[in-house]
């Protein structure tokens, strides 16, 4: 049984006993913070999807603006 008199003793005991380390992590962080890496990964994935959709929307908007500009030019030529 390890005797813990200092933080370095505690850290050594945790490194020698992975189950203690995991129990300490669970106690200190709680469920919500332990799932943070997964939440960040999911958010990153969703941001990438949104970014792709936004890029496509900008492409469509640029094409629409070009078509409208051409239509206006044709209308001016037709009226003029």
Image (cartoon, rainbow, N blue to C red):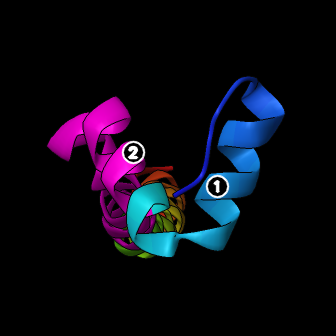
At horizontal 27% and vertical 37% (from top left) the residue drawn is: 27
From the viewer's side, name the closer residue of 8 and 29.
8
Is residue 77 left or right of 27 when viewed as pictured? right
Q: Could you tell me if residue 60 is visible in this image?
A: no
Identify whether 54 is placed above or below 12.
below
Q: Main secondary structure of the magenta part?
A: helix
Give the residue pinned by disc 2: 24
Q: Position of residue 76 (x, y in %)?
A: 49, 51
From the viewer's side, name the closer residue of 24 and 12.
12
From the viewer's side, name the closer residue of 78 and 4.
4
Residue 37 magenta: yes
At horizontal 72% and vertical 45% (from top left) the residue drawn is: 11
* Extreme residue in the top direction: 6
- Residue 38, disc: none
Identify whether 4 is placed above or below 5.
below
Mark 2 vs mark 1: in front? 1
Residues drawn in magenta: 22-46
Is residue 46 left or right of 25 when viewed as pictured? left
Q: Local crowd at mark 2 within 10 Å, few (<14), some, or many (≥20)?
A: few
Figure quadrant of residue 47: bottom left
Secondary structure beneath label 2: helix
Figure quadrant of residue 5: top right
From the viewer's side, name the closer residue of 68 and 19.
19
Q: Position of residue 78 (x, y in %)?
A: 42, 63
- Residue 13, disc: 1
Secondary structure beneath label 1: helix
Q: Earlier in the sequence, mark 2 or mark 1?
A: 1
Distance from the alpha carbon under mark 2 to that under mark 1: 11 Å
């Amino acid at each position: 049984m390890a005797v813990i008199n200092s933080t370095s003793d505690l850290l050594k005991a945790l490194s020698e006993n992975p189950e203690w380390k995991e129990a300490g992590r669970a106690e200190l962080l709680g469920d919500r913070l332990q799932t943070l890496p997964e939440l960040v990964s999911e958010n990153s994935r969703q941001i990438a999807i949104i970014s792709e959709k936004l890029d496509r929307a900008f492409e469509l908007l640029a094409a629409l603006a070009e078509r409208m500009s051409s239509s206006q030019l044709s209308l001016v030529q037709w009226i003029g």
